[in-house]
């Protein structure tokens, strides 16, 4: 045996103490049992089930999926059925400043813990996106390489393409959605709400969407243009692929139609020539200050007019929101929109021909009290209502009982 002479003797010497200590530890349990705090007659293997019922997940407990939704590793589980998939892309190795957005999917899921399917009705939308007949599940995260960006970008494209190619769980006309599709194959395809990840993830997403839909318009909420051709000092093809250049590359590859729009821009520029380049890439620009001069409704009108009836992809960089309200991001810019303003604009976009959406650049290492993760999770809830309704909700004037409204 492995017990050697001196050790064995020492162990025997300790035995009475260990035994006595152990017996003493049982005493509190015996006391609880006898005094009725623990139910002895329900001591069998189903004691919990018989006495308390289901093992429910509370807001602060249970495994982590977005809003406690059904979770499936959809890339390997080809039987998973969905109309909308939540998908994490934990990629952050193409940033120009703070890294950390690889933890974004985790932070958004964590920020969603007080949300759930059975409590998803909002006054602002007047609906619960989980109760509209479409199947929404969390498809987990794409296993992206943190060591090789070319490999990671390919992994994200292949993953996105795989899920786009799955059949929808529910036909659109069964849940009041348009049956018209912009897909080249004439079929309805699932829609994916991607949780980033740094903004580079949009390049493989647009590549995947292009194969199914052709070029799409992009509605881009961001403090930054992300249309720059390259960063100073760039010396290789791979180093052109960054979270500030992916739209330029997408334009080079003809992945976008020339009808895209930025909203919330306020970053510093090299000069006016950046805006000339931005226009050439295909974007109109709504600045952060425009919300004061134009108002929310005019911003909504301009976005809708710009993208029209084209297939639309929505990409939201959390840094569009003021860093006071969403500090956990890679390249914060002071003086942004409030979370409430962004949510109101998003409500005004319902009914456009959305083929997918994302929220990116959540980097929770820089967060305080989960403020950014909670804001991002709430915006994802808005995305779901936006994707599943055919027009913006009417102006909200709910006060007390709804009788007057009905
Ligand atoms: Mn940005």
Image (spheres, rainbow, N blue to C red):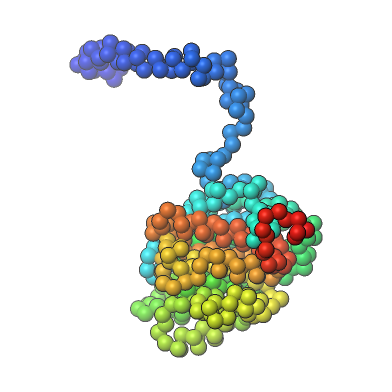
Which residue does the image show at 35% across and 78% down from the upper left?
233
Quadrant of the drawing holding the C terminus: bottom right
Which residue does the image show at 47% across and 71% down from the upper left?
336
Q: Which residue lies furthest to the right in this view?
A: 173
Horizontal side, residue 6 vs residue 120: left or right? left
Which residue does the image show at 41% across and 57% down from the upper left?
367
> Between 404 and 132, which is closer to the camera in this rendering?
404
Query: Is the residue 127 above or below the residue 186 in the image?
Result: above
Horizontal side, residue 243 vs residue 55: left or right? left
Marker count (numbered):
0
Across and down, in percent, residue 345 comes to 60, 70
> Between 402 and 174, which is closer to the camera in this rendering?
402
Image quadrant where residue 377 sits: bottom right
Residue 395: tell me if it is visible: yes
Horizontal side, residue 232 vs residue 199: left or right? left
> Between 257 and 317, which is closer to the camera in this rendering?
317
Across and down, in percent, residue 242 comes to 44, 71
Across and down, in percent, residue 341 comes to 55, 69
Residue 172: tell me if it is visible: no
> Between 258 and 51, which is closer to the camera in this rendering?
51
């Amino acid at each position: 045996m492995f017990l050697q002479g001196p050790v064995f003797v020492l162990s025997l010497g300790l035995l009475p103490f260990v035994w006595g200590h152990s017996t003493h530890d049982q005493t509190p349990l015996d006391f609880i049992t006898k005094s009725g705090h623990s139910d002895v007659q329900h001591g069998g293997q189903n004691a919990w089930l018989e006495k308390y019922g289901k093992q429910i997940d509370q807001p602060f407990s249970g495994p982590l999926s977005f809003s406690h939704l059904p979770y499936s590793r959809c890339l390997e589980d080809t039987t998973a059925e969905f109309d909308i998939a939540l998908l994490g892309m934990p990629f952050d190795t193409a940033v120009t400043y703070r890294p950390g957005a690889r933890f974004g999917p985790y932070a958004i899921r964590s920020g969603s813990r007080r949300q759930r399917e059975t409590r998803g009705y909002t006054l602002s939308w007047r609906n619960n996106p989980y109760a509209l007949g479409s199947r929404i599940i969390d498809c987990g995260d794409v296993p992206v390489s943190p060591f090789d960006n070319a490999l990671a970008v390919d992994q994200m494209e292949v993953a996105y393409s795989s899920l786009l190619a799955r059949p929808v769980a529910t036909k659109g006309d069964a849940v009041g959605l348009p049956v018209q599709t912009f897909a080249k194959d004439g079929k309805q395809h699932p829609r994916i709400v991607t949780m980033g990840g740094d903004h580079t993830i949009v390049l493989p997403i647009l590549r995947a969407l292009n194969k199914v839909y052709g070029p799409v318009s992009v509605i881009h909420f961001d403090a930054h243009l992300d249309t720059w051709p390259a960063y100073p000092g760039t010396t290789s093809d791979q180093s052109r692929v960054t979270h500030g250049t992916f739209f330029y590359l997408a334009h080079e590859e003809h992945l976008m139609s020339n009808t895209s729009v930025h909203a919330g821009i306020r970053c510093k520029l090299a000069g006016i020539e950046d805006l000339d380049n931005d226009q050439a890439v295909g974007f109109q620009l709504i600045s952060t200050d425009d919300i004061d001069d134009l108002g929310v409704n005019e911003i909504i009108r301009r976005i809708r007019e710009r993208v029209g009836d084209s297939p639309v992809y929505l990409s939201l960089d959390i840094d569009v929101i003021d860093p006071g309200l969403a500090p956990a991001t890679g390249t914060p810019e002071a003086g942004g929109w409030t979370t409430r303003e962004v949510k109101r604009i998003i409500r005004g976009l319902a009914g456009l021909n959305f083929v997918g959406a994302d929220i990116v650049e959540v980097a929770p290492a820089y967060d305080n009290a989960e403020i950014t993760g909670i804001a991002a999770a709430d915006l994802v809830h808005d995305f779901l209502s936006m994707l599943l309704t055919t027009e913006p909700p009417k102006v909200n004037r709910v006060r007390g009982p709804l009788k007057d409204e009905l």
